Image: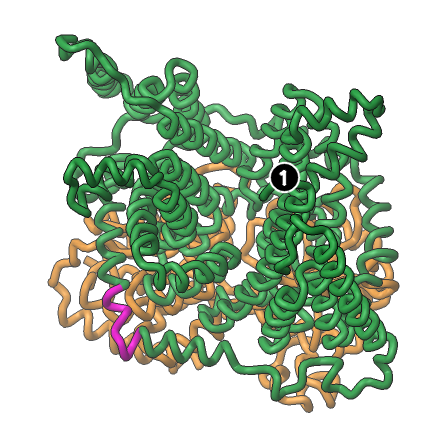
Amino acid sequence: MPNKAILPAAALALASMSAAHAADSSDPIIIPTHNWSSQIVMSHVVGQIFESMGNSVEYVSTDSQAVYESVRLGDVTLELEVWEGAFGPAFEAALEKGGLHDAGDHNAVTREDWWYPAWTKDACPGLPDWQALNDCAELFATPETGDKGRFLGGPVDWLKHDQERVEALGMDFVVVNAGSASALWAEVAAAERDKRPVVIFNWTPNFVEALYPGEFVEFPEYVEGCKDDPSVGPNPNATYDCGNPANGYLKKAAWDGMPDKWPNAYAVLQKISFTNPQIAEMAKLVDIDEFEPEDAAAEWLEQNEDVWKPWVEGGA
Amino acid sequence: MTATATNTTPLATGADARMRVAQVLLASALLLAAGKGLLPQVLIRPPDWLVWPFADWINAFFAFLRDDLGLIHVTRAFADGVEWLLDVTANLLYGKNRWPRIGPIPWTVIAITAAAIGYYLNGWRLALLAGLTFVWVAVMGQWEWTMETLSVILVAAPVSVLLGLLTGTLAWKSPTFRKILNPLLNVAQSLPHFAYMIPVVVFIGVGPKAGAIVTIIFSVPPMIRMTLLGLQKVPPEVIEAGHMAGATRWQLLRHVRLPTARSDLLVGVNQVIMQCLAMVVLASFIGMPGLGQKLLQLLQGLKIGRSIEIGITIVLLAVMLDRCSKAWATKQPEHLEKGTSWLIRHRILVIWASLATLFWALSLVFPLLHEIGRREAFSLSDPLDAIMDWIIVTLDPITQWLRWFLIVWVLIPLRDGMLWLPFSAVLVFLMAVGWAVGGRRSALICLAYFGLIAMSGWWDRAMITVYTVTFAVFLATLIGFPLGIWGSRSEGRARAVLLVCDTLQTFPSFIYLIPVIMLFGVNDVAVVGAVVLFAAVPLIRYTIEGLRGVPEAQIEAANMSGASRKQTLWSVRLPLALPTIMVGVNQSVMFSLFMVIIAAFIGTQDLGQEMQRALSSSDVGKGLVLGLAVAFMGLMVDHLVTVWARRRRKALGLEA
């Protein structure tokens, strides 16, 4: 899998090397922003790096699933956060249609799974083990779920297969889907008031970690095939009888026309690689310190020159 | 149907016959429901052969339009034109690096310009309102986002007005075109916003231009309607006079008809502006920059206080633009004596020009007069957050109980009941209602609308939408009706209540979603709660307007015959106001249908949730089918209420 991803990227890198001294087009590089802060700040960080190289940059806010169609058509130039779990399918579908390619991985790993805020552990001390969670199911009951526990999942279009997992593992939980990420956070914020136990869908890196410390539930470890092959995993008759991978990729994607049109910016894009703490820091500047994304990006760039300067200097 | 009030006997027998058929239909609906166990599956849920693949057909049609007919080049060319305009306003207002590269204009200069326009239109008070709105925006540090929003509206509104004028005039000229256009407009005005967006994403892409275009599409129907209405109302005498003056057809249109229809046209302009503002937040889903986008980001971070600040800005902008366009509609041309000097005739222009130049110069020296950054800006977010927190904590014990009660005893049973009903029983029941209200034609119309919903294959989800909307409108009536009666007691109260209604209505609906979740959690109670807030507004408004619109003479007559205040209310004022109140119910249903789609962001299992999915996968066919299903519900209610109200008005002698 990693090899497959690297090969075309390397080929494109070679192609862009041959055009090495060609200057970048003066057309603006269009960077899409979505509705979570780390992505917005990262987009501005990268945008400001491009600007420091003399490029012009514009930002456009788009839906995080529909964006791959736009990258493919060249309406936007790149995408900086391709999460394996959330956007892997959309990205790979677009990859198949052609028009965009994989521009390399970030150092960061992503994880998306069932998660609870710290106070939940007081009520259900056996956590983070999933069987312990199941034993406490009643604590998570709500009027609409009767005496079963409620798991608040993300919007259905995130396709998380929580329902399948509940069935495969025989859990006493009902999956209720929130309609948006905001709805998830609002629920946690409301639960915090009376320290009510909740278990929701969450991911890392994410600003919520800074606001509400918590942990992921440990499900049977993810093994290749557990999602397609019933015989893999603890339940021999069901698929999805495991957690999500604890170290999913975080990729960058670029429009196929980018290496030719902005060869220098593209060279930098390939080198760009952020770590989990760096991404969390970007999110924190906006969510906790109340910077505007532009200012947060400028602040981050100022504090982390040793991180990004080498990318630019090596590239020109 | 043809029976008129001139003779009471045929009217009565007509009504009796109608009722008898309706009763028979109602009985059969009950029978179908009661005998569900005996029914064949075909009558319980639409069978496969009845579910037609409308979505695939629409997708095939769109693919044909786009790829085979090459419509995508046309739309992209149009979009490029719009983009060029957007770049100009974007440069002027917030300094985007495009031609003419003059901007950004300092905020002080824009505030002065707004005040000057306000003064020109309606004197000091409007000048203050317009000026202070921009001062608020600047001081709260929202300048750039507001300018981003305005840069789109400044393009979208005029384009929309122009398109509306053009289409309206064409419709007025050609009766055939009018016949085709009318149902299209009806559907367009009841289609949920999201349904428009998917085709726009496919044809135009994302970004400010897509935001502008979706805003144009959404705001053009009222302009078309008002243009048509205005032109149709022009009295023949005026046209005669034009003819006698020897005007050509074009001159007649340009110099006689359009100016005579001026006030209707300007009402249309006003509606266009209001629709544009309503789209500010929603259009940001497909890339419209500015306040809406910022608002969604802030809500995502649960920053309620700062989202409310943005909400206030949107309301202020709406009020300002509303007042300005209304003042423009009623403004009479000024007539100055001959020989008045140029300076006096153009004194506002001169004062504006000198002040603007002065402040532009000053802003070069004092950057604070040019732009106020977020750091120097004020913020009300701390007190606002504290108030919100306090409200939520205080209400918490009540809402916890209410949540439990509503879910366990009301909502779950209701929903299960709705889903349990055989679809044939629902269809026959709707026919019964239709027949009772308007005879066979109405019954068939009801059947057609809901029959199509059944054929779309989304029956279960549609029933959940119906259940949410019905219950929300019911609650809204319980709240809105007494409030309306209370508000209609005096002029002052009426004005105060209507002001609150206007504010609630222009306040971006997304802001309500978060507090509602905090109060009720992610469930149907929260959804119903959010919908009720919106559904109550038109009910209150029309109750007040209906009650206050009752002819003085009628009330006087009641008073003279010694009726108590209560008797006058129940036996005279309410019955006379009922047709108007029913218009409120109608609008309430429309608003609920729009809001229930937005409430998908809380988490629902109805049509709205599927619509969200269709948007994120850019599935045009599915989105339009779902949108049409919602529109049909609204159109059916609209039909029933209109027919009923017309009949009622006739019976009351309010209308010939």
Near mark 1 (Cα within 10 A), the count class, few <14, some 14-19 or many ≥20, is: few
Q: Nearer the viewer, residue A270 or A308?
A: A270
How far across and how far down the image is residue B23, in percent?
A: 81, 67
Label 1 SS: loop
How far across and how far down the image is residue B603, in percent?
A: 65, 58
Numbered disc 1: what chain?
Answer: B
Q: Quadrant of residue B350?
A: top left
Q: Can residue A180 be seen from the camera position used here?
A: no
Disc 1 marks which amino acid?
Leu
Q: Quadrant of residue A262?
A: bottom left
Question: Does B113 appear above or below A258?
Answer: above
Q: Is residue B580 left or right of residue B407?
A: left
Q: Nearer the viewer, residue B293 or B255?
A: B255
Image mark count: 1
Image quadrant in which the C terminus of chain B is located: top right
Judging by colour alone, the chain drawn in green in this rendered image is B
Q: Quadrant of residue A77?
A: bottom left
Magenta stretch, residue numbers: B66-74
Question: Does B4 appear above or below B332?
Answer: below
Question: Does A242 appear above or below B392?
Answer: below
In magenta segment, residue B71: yes
Check disc 1 and report the residue beneath it.
B654
Q: Nearer the viewer, residue B150 or B97?
A: B150
Judging by colour alone, the chain drawn in orange in this rendered image is A
Q: Is residue B434 left or right of residue B117?
A: right
How far across and how far down the image is residue B343, in percent?
A: 16, 10
Q: Can residue B640 be seen from the camera position used here?
A: yes
Question: Does B1 appear above or below B306?
Answer: below
In magenta segment, residue B106: no
- Seen at 43% across and 76% down, the residue is B59
- Seen at 80% across and 68% down, the residue is B26
- Seen at 78% across and 26% down, the residue is B558
